[in-house]
Image (spheres, grey):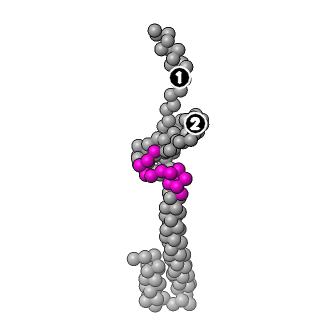
Amino acid sequence: MTVSEKASYIKGLLDGMNISKEKDEGKLFSAIADLLEDLSLSVADLEDETSAMREYIDELDTDLSALESDVYDLDDEEEYDCEGCDEEECPIGLECPACGEMVYAEPCELESRDTLECPSCGQILNIVCEDVDDEEEEEEESSEN
């Protein structure tokens, strides 16, 4: 039974009780029944609006996915295309352990923080950056020889 149906049922019960609307109790019960009816109509309107907004958001999400696919030239299982840019400028892709989606972040973003939020499911990803320069590796190798 919906909220509107319940409010109508209560109003019907009140009418069937033959309570005089001239007395204080009758006025009170009548006002409560009217309030319940108004509230139930407001709730029904909000449910309709929420449903319409949900459909609109789903359409926007679909359009945004298509736009991301076009802009980043990605398929669902394809990795980020790094052609034509320096490796330092390329986004770094991390796979979300919760939903399996690829989460991309610029290296400069990763340097300033230690967590990243998955935009698909909201899972917080811990970031561990290992900074080892090639020169330091070469020096260590040459000192060992």
Q: In this view of the protein, which residue sits in the foreground, 76 or 14?
A: 76
Residue at the disc numbered 1: 134
| Residue drawn where x is 48% and y is 50% of the image | 74
Q: Which mark is residue 86?
A: 2
Identify the mark nearer the N-term, 2 or 1: 2
Q: Which mark is residue 67?
A: none
Residue 116 visible:
no
Between the C-alphas of marks 2 and 1, the distance is 16 Å
**10 in relation to 63, above or below:** below
| Residue drawn where x is 53% and y is 75% of the image | 45
Q: In this view of the protein, which residue sits in the foreground, 43 or 96?
A: 96
Residue 60, magenta (yes or no): no
| Span shown in magenta | 67-79
| Residue 31, image quadrant | bottom right
| Residue 97, image quadrant | top left
**30 in relation to 77, above or below:** below
Q: Residues within 10 Å of mark 2 (few under 14, many from 20)?
A: few
Instruction: Pinpoint residue 132: horizontal percent, then vertical percent.
Output: 52, 24
| Residue drawn where x is 55% and y is 53% of the image | 71
Q: Nearer the viewer, mark 2 or mark 1?
A: 2
Instruction: Pinpoint residue 5: horizontal percent, then vertical percent.
Output: 43, 80
Q: Residues within 10 Å of mark 1 (few under 14, many from 20)?
A: few
Q: SS for tag 1?
A: helix
Residue 76, magenta (yes or no): yes
Instruction: Pinpoint residue 7: horizontal percent, then vertical percent.
Output: 47, 80
Q: SS for tag 2?
A: loop
